[in-house]
Structure formats: structure tokens, C-alpha cells
Amino acid sequence: MATNPHPVENGRAPAGALPASGNAPAIGHALSVSEWRDFWALLKPRVMTLVVFTAACALLVAPGTLSPFLSFVAILCIAVGAGAAAAFNQWWEADIDGIMKRTADRPLPAGRLSRDEALGFAIILSVASVVTLGFATNWIAAAWLAFSIFFYAVVYTIWLKPRTPQNIVIGGAAGAFPPIIGWAAVTGDVTTLPVLLFAIIFAWTPPHFWALALFVRTDYAKAGIPMLPVTHGITETRKQILVYTLVLVAVSVAPWTLGLTGPIYGIAAAVLGALFLALSVAVFRSKSEESADMQAEKRLFKYSILYLFLIFAALVADGVAA
């Protein structure tokens, strides 16, 4: 595992602990395939896939019309904006990423890219995505995209994450904005349904992320990040996972009970929520203390990703059938 010789304070190494530049290519240097892959890795593409999907689903079910080309541009801008936020995150956390086993091989802690290049990359993508979305669709959607980038990069990464175990609860809003942006790109406004879609992702984030945090908690402890399993222990984290899952199930069926969606979505939300709850109960009942033995937590984490894909797919299927 990569180590960092500098002490970490508040989740950050002292200024100068990591060089602004290192083995990264100089400006103007032709990038190799491996270097392009490193810039691509700054975007956290696996996370971006989920962001793009939820935004696209909201765009598809929103009332109104947007040409296929402009729809593609809108989704591309949301994806690029999400990638820019991820690049900001890795620029700021390069030092603690070097301490954590699961992140030590990211481009910055591994020395394949410099912090300066990551910051420049993030700024360029942020500005380009927001401006392009504004001109291609409307400035309401662009403003939501700009705010989502700011929220993830500043409110979550810089302010909340190193200071409070509630970081993932409040910071979960950052990943919940894409449906609002996708909806606004079509309609130019935000109504009840996109707010409920926001609430679904907001409630989904704590059980999803805390399930992961339970079996990688030693990494967070070494890095000085106050994640709930580190600050309040395993038992309390399992209880909170169950509590937020109950909230998630209630919120997820709300679009149906309020008459905003049809039975296809409603039945899917109920079934998927029941499975999520069953897995959360298994986590709550688990007595495993060692990461290698936390099979219930790993099952919940994997299912949570599938859950979000399926419930948004059901939303689109319901809209098509209506």
C-alpha cells in the first residue's frame, strides 16, 4: 500500500506535502494512451455512469420535447460536469488518497499526473460543461449543473468530508442533482417529480456508501476521515443504514402514491425497496467485525448500485407505457 510520510490534519496534508508537478507530461507534450487513461480516471467514470443514467431518465420522462441532438448534448454536459467535480475531488484529496489502499493507485497519488494539471483539467471541464449546457438548453439547467459541481467540490469535499461523520448524508445531495438537471434541461423549471427523484438518491446515498465504508473503514481511519464507522462504530453504522433504508423505501414509492407515475414504476419501487430493506436488515443483524467477513455489507453495496439503475429504468418504462 502506498504511504504518505506527511501527517494528515483534518483530512489534508500540510501545504507542500505533495508536489504540484511530478511525472506528469509537460504542457504541449503529446499525450500517450496511458496518459489519456489517467485523465479519464480523474473523471471517476464508473460513478459518472450512474450520474448520466439518472439524468437521462429524468430527461426522457420530463414533459416537453428536446431534439435528439440537444438531448445528447445535455447528457454529455452533465457527464462532463460530474467528471469535473470528481477531478476537483481528486485534486484536493491527493494526499489522503495516497494513504488509502483502494485509492493509492489513482493518477495523482501514484505520481502519473500533477495536481496543477488535475486542477486545470477540472476548471476547463466545469466551465465548458456549464456554458455549453446553458446555450444548448437553458440557463436554469446550467445553473443547477454549476451548483452541483460547487456542492461536490467545495461543500462536500473541502468542507464536510474532513469534518463531520454526517458528510455523506449532507454531501449526498451532490449526487442527487442530475435528475433535476436533466428535467430542467427539457422544461426550464423544477417540479414535484424531479424533487422526489432527488430525494430518492439523497436517501439512497447513506446506506449505499456506509455499506462500503464498513468494510473499508480501516482506510478511512488511517486517512483521518471521520466516516460514521470510524467515529461511531460498526453497530451504530448498521443501525443508521437500516434507518435510511426505511426512509428510502418510503420516498421511492411516493411518486406513485402521489399519482405522478403509474403502476409499472410503483410495483417496481415496492419490490426493489423490499429487497433493499431485506439486505439492510441482514446488515443490521450481522455481527461481523472483520472486513473480510462482511458479506452482508458487500451484498448490500453491490445491490444498491443495481437498485438505482433499476428504479430509474422502471421510471422510464412507466413513462413509455403511459
Image (spheres, grey):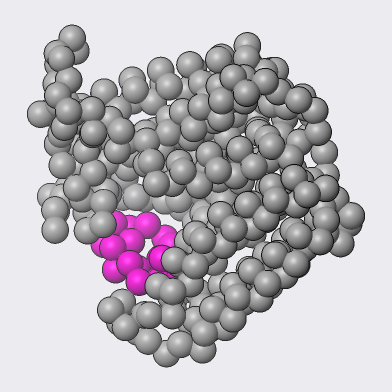
Foreground of the two, 128 or 241: 128
Q: Is residue 170 visible?
A: no
Residue sitting at the far right:
259
What residue is rendered at 14% in x and 24% in y? 32
Instruction: Please state the horizontal and vertical placement of residue 126, each as a whole percent of the image.
Output: 47, 23
Does 25 appear in magenta? no
Residue at 26% from the left image edge and 51% from the top image edge? 103
**Relative horizontal placement of residue 147, taking residue 220 as reference (left or right):** right
- Which residues are drawn in magenta? 210-227
> Residue 111: x, y in percent?
14, 36
Q: Is residue 123 above or below residue 317?
A: above
Q: Position of residue 171 (x, y in %)?
A: 55, 49
Image quadrant occupied by the N terminus:
bottom left
Return the residue nearer the eye: 290 or 10: 290
Residue at 34% from the left image edge and 68% from the top image edge:
217
Q: How many marks?
A: 0
